[in-house]
Image: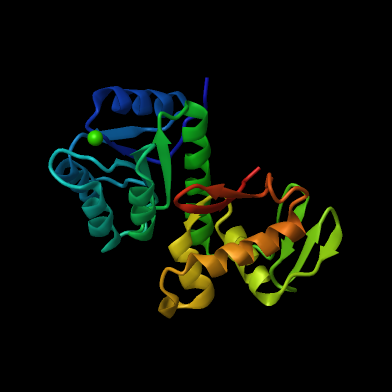
Amino acid sequence: MSQKRSELLLVVEDDARISNFLSYALAQEGFPVLTSDTAQGALSLLVSQPVDLMLLDLGLPDADGMDVIKRVREWSELPIIVVSARDQDREKAAALDAGADDYLTKPFSATELMARIRVAIRHLYRESSGRHQAVAEVGGLKIDLDRRLVFLEDAEVHLTPMEYSLLAVLFQNIGKVLTTGALIRELYGPGYGNDTQALRTLMAGLRRKVEANPAKPRYILTEIGVGYRLVDE
Ligand code: CA
């Protein structure tokens, strides 16, 4: 038996099979779950119930899920995980840029689902406590954010200031996907537009220094058509 969880989850999905699968998998993990098959129903629940996290299908019968994200972000920082079809890379990136925290690509397993939810809940508590984690690590890769130092298997890695900034942003969002657009805005400022080449070059340089095999990265994964994710082990 799984332990009872206190976080209230909202599943917004009009495909009954997927909605049932999500509700069942989440209930198995002990989460109380609310469901809605429309955007309007979801918004009503969000204003009347203490929802902690929302799983959101983008193709809803009464509205585009993107509009739900934008509406919710007017008043809430609630974690939103988008449930999306495989061929909708541009839509995934747009949803993340509109304020979604992550996405799941259909079809997905209960294991993937729980991994995404764990990351979102951890970020929720970290952000609400305002705690700044000075040292973070994943596998053999470690960053000291106060001293601006990076170590790989305990040996110091010398990064350029931009490579360091890129890695620091990834560590601050560990386990979450960051869109190419969001990373460019964060690193180069809003005036830089969508020039992905600079970011790709920077990423290649960073991977050469922190990945044993940059062609098969272990830490910084490419989310094709969307962006990058630092794994959360
Ligand atoms: Ca749908």
Identify the residue at horizontal 42%, vertical 77% (top origin).
190
Q: Can the viewer see residue 127 in this picture?
A: yes
| Image coords of residue 37 (percent x, y) | 20, 34
In front of the other: 122 or 143: 143
Identify the residue at horizontal 79%, vertical 69% (top origin).
158
Identify the residue at horizontal 47%, vertical 27% (top origin).
110
In front of the other: 161 or 214: 214
| Image coords of residue 200 (percent x, y) | 57, 62
| Image coords of residue 25 (percent x, y) | 42, 25
Identify the residue at horizontal 84%, vertical 53% (top origin).
153
Q: Is residue 202 left or right of residue 12?
A: right
Q: Is residue 179 left or right of residue 71?
A: right
Q: Can the viewer see residue 135 in this picture?
A: no
Q: Is residue 139 left or right of residue 68?
A: right
Residue at the top extreme? 1
Task: Examine the image and state in which quarter residue 194 appears.
Answer: bottom left
Task: Examine the image and state in which quarter residue 87 appears.
Answer: top left
